[in-house]
Image (cartoon, coloured by chain):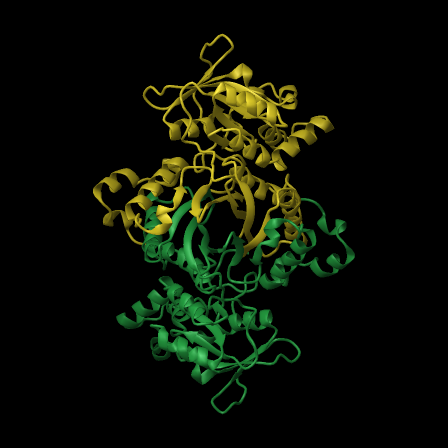
Chain colours: A green, B yellow
Amino acid sequence: MGLPCHLSTAPDAIMRYVMKLSELGEFGLIAAINDTINKSRVASQPSWQKLVTGIGDDAAAWQVKNSLQLATTDSLVQDVHFDLDTITWEELGWKALAINLSDIAAMGGIPRYALVSLFLPGELETENVLDFYRGMMRLAGNFGVAIAGGNISRASYIITSIALLGEAQDNTLLKRSTASVGEQIAVTGYLGLAAGGLKMLRQKIALEDTAASTLRQGLFLPAPRINEGQTLVSRGVKTAIDISDGLVADLYHICDASNVSAVIRTDMVPTHLTVQACFPDYLNLALYGGEDYELLFTAGSDTVERVRHDLNCPVTVIGEITKKEGTAAVKLTNSKGETVLGEQRGWEHFKNGRYDSPLS
Amino acid sequence: MGLPCHLSTAPDAIMRYVMKLSELGEFGLIAAINDTINKSRVASQPSWQKLVTGIGDDAAAWQVKNSLQLATTDSLVQDVHFDLDTITWEELGWKALAINLSDIAAMGGIPRYALVSLFLPGELETENVLDFYRGMMRLAGNFGVAIAGGNISRASYIITSIALLGEAQDNTLLKRSTASVGEQIAVTGYLGLAAGGLKMLRQKIALEDTAASTLRQGLFLPAPRINEGQTLVSRGVKTAIDISDGLVADLYHICDASNVSAVIRTDMVPTHLTVQACFPDYLNLALYGGEDYELLFTAGSDTVERVRHDLNCPVTVIGEITKKEGTAAVKLTNSKGETVLGEQRGWEHFKNGRYDSPLS
């Protein structure tokens, strides 16, 4: 397993990082990586100087002449993020691109080019892989994305890894770090479909056709909020994130980055009607399920009102940004203002698994 | 396994693609994917219009205002491209970035930003992952590359997938498709170290320290020819590729893209002295081994002479571009002009495996 690395590192590093990834968790690992990069980078180099947002937002952004370039990358791993018993190859192609488009949407940007890396077993049928591209191309065509290149490697199971490049509108970005006390917290669309769809498929729950197909579409064919993100930017919103890890988890990301806290009224969370109708625990699915790829944003009430008027999708105010006391926290309350439910954040790699995975 | 895809496709597609990836091979699959993308893309969209090179060159290139942006992506898969018995984590970090830098070098470009995606088992020690970043940052610092973002996912074995973004010098690119009959074929540096290093490690061949360390460095710490690629562009060279699949295989890529053939004088191939000293089959290692990450380029003899004068590394003329008769071909000759050796192209995913892989 290579060098006995911990012997060659500084004492504080030994104290922090002699632990397995499964103990540290995804977000702890990202913090440790960020720290390592910051210690070893040559900050005076032009690329670092022109980097506007790096690790820690939905997408990276840097200045090229008088435009702001965006880049993001996201992956789907077989038996971690999907299984081939339930998703079709066309849906997989759509979703692999959609999760990246959603990151560009969360920056309010314009998507342009994709690099598509696939890791595939040799015994796959070629037509399956081509169906993957057909599904991806349908979504790419909707948003003017060109497939500029990619890479194919052999592996024992399927992984998709797409890098998506884009551009900011008018050099302006939606960030995670700009929420301020007193702002309203709002969300586009309805929540819980993806988590409901996953629950239906994993637990083989029989539902009537319309409900089943709505849930399946929510899980496998999410519609990234590209146009909505651009409208948010143009109407003066500064802070947004896409809901991939879960409403509460992603609100934590905003609170951590902005150094604030938040309070949500759970009775105002816009759970999708199909989810309400099919699942007694619908509120949990909406709060913690993730993969809805709606936009969660904060802004003053006038701005939210303007956005609500101009968007072609529902916009629901669900809470308010509050002053941070101690650590950043997301408090959930009912209609009477009473605190409800325990603290739970959402999806985290190395600590959670959505699928019954054979992986360690 | 998803939809019965072949039922829903056109008859010609049925005839071509009812086969497994292991039968079709990496390059056949890339051609089929390219075909699928071309049939389903909306060619009138601005992103497609501004795409200067897409699939089929070392990196993609597109116009952003008056500059030419470059992007490439390449991956390392555990037990396909490396194993942890031989490579250290720092070396893995260096190499994961180096193979991408080499693609930018082959375009004559300036590297700027990297997005780093890692797929990792939960039982890994955190310090190993941080050592990966330390190795990568050493190389990134050498060439002014900033780590702009990335993604971490859980998986059962290690995969690195880096997307590297850059910029063309003076809006000019080195391409694969511009070789013309009568041009000289030249190569930077010396060949065969990576293949020799792999052979030494796989076959546990005991060599004296200096040789062993030279071979190991060639395999695990390749030095991408970024500065040399930029010099080629500025001295008027139009055609280049980096040697990743192997000298012969990569020359085939140039011949296929440029619609020409080539003849190489095997006695002129600059095999590294250490490889010559350690391996009786040194010429095969230099011709077919791959992973040398030297630049292979074609140009008129005056241009080659100018480049040779201006570069700080060896430049060796090894042959000539010839007229294509029938299919593109790379002919190998000895010093008397007699054809030698059989036809063999080099590394291809799904058909080859460098390591004793447990993968299918």
The quarter of the displayed image where residue A20 is located:
bottom right
Residue A273 % position (x, y): 34, 78
Q: Is residue A306 above or below residue A71?
A: below
B144 or B7: nearer the viewer: B144
Q: Residue at x 66, y 78 (%)?
A: A326
Q: Is residue A145 above or below residue B82?
A: below
Q: Is residue B63 above or below residue A326?
A: above
Q: Residue at x 33, y 65 (%)?
A: A217
B72 or B359: nearer the viewer: B72
A206 or B250: nearer the viewer: B250
Query: Total label count?
Result: 0
A40 or A110: nearer the viewer: A110
Residue A241 % position (x, y): 49, 68
Q: Residue at x 51, y 59 (%)?
A: A59
Task: Residue at the far left: name it.
Answer: B11
Residue B115 % position (x, y): 54, 51
Residue B120 % position (x, y): 56, 53
Task: Residue at the far right: name it.
Answer: A11
